[in-house]
């Protein structure tokens, strides 16, 4: 089993669209058994999958161990694809973790029993650096980090790389890539070139800024569920191919 976190310090960069679309592609194309865990209290991933963002007992129930994660999992409309929905109480996950022994190891321990059930687990993460983030980093094998090509992207990528290095998270593979890209903008093209020069490990796949991605909120489905071809779904398929190669490197 591989655990991938869709994560960035900055919000509004396409983390949820990445988690939803890659989960759908992996489950349908590769026939992986996939679980998506919506850790963001806003519950956007849960919304896209048409599942109520509600966890009985809230975050305290599973952090304390009174409820196992497998009892909270919901089936989606798609074969091989399940969801652990969000809950508004997740806004207090840091507090719940802080009151637990070895808080940064808690998510890893909670996910361990699911190893035999799933080939891939994708975590849709809230945007911050916090105790929850530390627990996500410890639990994950890969950190898939979408970046909009703006001047803040390089800064947040540097911060993230420094944090991982300073905390000796050597087990964690960081996979940055560009998201919400408008190639008509000179600045976007220049920043993508500059960041790629500085960080050559940036993935080659580029997710465009496009209305069909925004339409996911209207359709409440992954892109691949309502369109067969198009530059956006093709971009996510290319991104999955790169992630798949990294998983098998």
Image: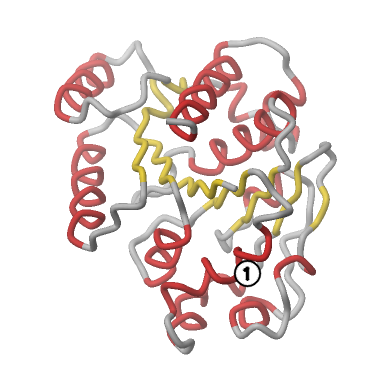
Quadrant holding the C terminus: top left
Q: Secondary structure at mark 1?
A: helix
Vertical placement of 162 versus 227: above or below?
Answer: below
Vertical placement of 207 versus 101: above or below?
Answer: above
Q: Residue at x 55, y 52 (%)?
A: 123
Q: How many marks?
A: 1
**In the rendered view, does 96 fall on the left or right side of 37?**
left
**Residue 7 screen position, x and y as percent:** 43, 48
Q: Residue at x 61, y 56 (%)?
A: 38
Q: Nearer the viewer, residue 246 or 95?
A: 246
Q: Nearer the viewer, residue 60 or 108?
A: 108
Indicate the quadrant where residue 150 lies.
top left
Q: Residue at x 57, y 70 (%)?
A: 90
- Neighbor class of circle 1 (other Cα within 10 Å; few <14, some 14-19, many 20+) is some
Q: What colour scheme was applied to this rendering of the protein?
A: secondary structure
Q: Which residue is mark 1?
A: 88
Vertical placement of 127 versus 29: above or below?
Answer: below
Q: Residue at x 23, y 59 (%)?
A: 168
**Residue 124 screen position, x and y as percent:** 54, 51
**Residue 80 screen position, x and y as percent:** 79, 40
**In the rendered view, does 19 fall on the left or right side of 188?**
right
**In the rendered view, does 167 fall on the left or right side of 69?**
left
**Residue 233 screen position, x and y as percent:** 60, 19
């Amino acid at each position: 089993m591989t655990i991938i976190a869709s994560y960035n310090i900055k919000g509004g960069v396409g983390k949820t669209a990445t988690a939803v679309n890659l989960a759908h592609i992996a489950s349908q194309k590769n026939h992986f058994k996939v679980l998506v865990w919506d850790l963001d209290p806003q519950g956007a991933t849960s919304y896209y999958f048409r599942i109520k963002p509600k966890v009985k007992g809230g975050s305290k129930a599973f952090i304390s161990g009174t409820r196992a994660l497998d009892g909270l999992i919901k089936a989606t409309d798609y074969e091989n694809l399940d969801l652990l929905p969000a809950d508004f109480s997740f806004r207090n996950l840091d507090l719940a973790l802080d009151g637990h022994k070895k808080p940064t190891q808690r998510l890893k321990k909670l996910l361990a029993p699911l190893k035999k059930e799933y080939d891939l687990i994708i975590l849709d993460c809230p945007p911050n650096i916090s105790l929850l983030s530390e627990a996500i980093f410890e639990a994950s094998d890969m950190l898939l980090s979408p970046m909009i090509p703006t001047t803040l992207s390089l800064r947040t990528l540097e911060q993230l790389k420094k944090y991982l290095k300073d905390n000796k998270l050597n087990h964690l593979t960081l996979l940055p890539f560009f998201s919400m890209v408008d190639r008509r903008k000179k600045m976007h093209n220049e920043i993508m070139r500059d960041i790629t020069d500085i960080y050559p490990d940036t993935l080659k796949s580029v997710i465009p800024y496009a209305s069909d991605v925004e339409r996911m909120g209207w359709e409440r489905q992954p892109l691949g569920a309502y369109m067969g071809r198009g530059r956006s779904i093709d971009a996510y398929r290319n991104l999955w191919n790169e992630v798949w190669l990294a998983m098998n490197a």
